[in-house]
Image: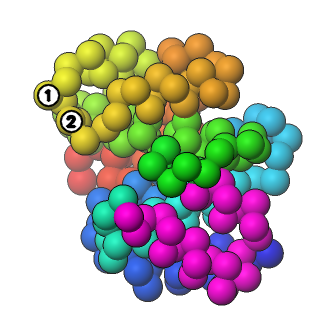
Amino acid sequence: MKSRQDAWALLTAYTTEPHLIRHALAVEAAMRGYARRLGEDEELWGLTGLLHDFDYERWPTLADHPLKGSEILRQEGYPEEMVVAILGHGNHTGVARTTAMAHHLFAVDELTGLVMAVAMVKGRQLAAVEPGSVLRKMKDKAFARGVSRQDVLDGAQEIGRPLEEHVGLVISDLMLVAPELGLAGPA
């Protein structure tokens, strides 16, 4: 298994946009949180979250992402379970999500973006975000319009969690990395 340092080097070799790096950190934190809760391999799940979009900046089209990245991950020697989970995090690839890790990656990907967007309007304070505020903002189609509401709903269903509980767990996981996400409040 590659180290987090190796994964970070790969991420930053392909990703320079700060918002994409923050997204990777958020998904990593949420994946680590779920791995801890479920007694799964926290390092594997965390690195899967960290690297799930590492190729997006370079290859943002549905035809290329995450297919180009999966080729690189295989060449770099990352576990096939990770590669398949990353391939399955987008419905457009046609890769079925058959593992708990793959289901959870899909479940946290879009949701982390929504949670972070809510924190931005609350003065960059993740601590001010509650599940109810995220659910209310989710109904506003103009807010964080790039976030697929259907994927958020489907993700919670795939992992068998009520949506409000799932949102609360993701918020608590992101709180652990709020400073790295720029969401610990005003500087």
Q: Which residue corresponds to the image point at 36% horizontal and 59% vertical from the top-left?
A: 62
Where does label 2 land, which residue?
Answer: 145
Q: Is residue 27 visible?
A: no
Q: Is the residue 120 above or below the residue 130 in the image?
A: below
**Residue 161 in the image: x percent, y percent?**
64, 19
Please provide the residue range marked out in magenta.
Answer: 63-87
Q: Which mark is residue 142?
A: 1
Figure colour scheme: rainbow
Q: Secondary structure at mark 2?
A: loop
| Label 2, label 1: how far apart the Cα atoms are | 5 Å
Q: Main secondary structure of the magenta part?
A: helix
Position of the N terminus, as image quadrant, is: bottom right
Q: Residue at x 40, y 69 (%)?
A: 64
Answer yes or no: do the residues labelled 2 and 1 have beta carbons within 8 Å?
yes
Task: Identify the image quadrant of residue 123.
Answer: top left
Residue depicted at x 66% and y 43%: 97
Per the image, label 1 sits on a secondary structure element best described as: loop
* 47 relative to 155 in the view: left or right: right
| 60, above or below 29, in the image | below
Residue 64 forms part of the magenta stretch: yes
- Tell me if residue 51 can be seen: yes
| Image coords of residue 10 (percent x, y) | 53, 81
x then y, percent, for residue 140? 20, 19
The residue furthest left is 142
Name the residue rendered at 74%, 43% in the picture: 98
Q: Amino acid at mark 1?
A: Ala
Q: Looking at the picture, which amino acid does disc 2 mark?
A: Arg
What crowding class fits label 2: few (fewer than 14 Cα within 10 Å), some (14-19), or many (20 or more)? few
Quadrant in which residue 47 is drawn = bottom right
**Residue 102 — which label?**
none
Please tell me which residue lies in front, 129 or 95.
Answer: 95
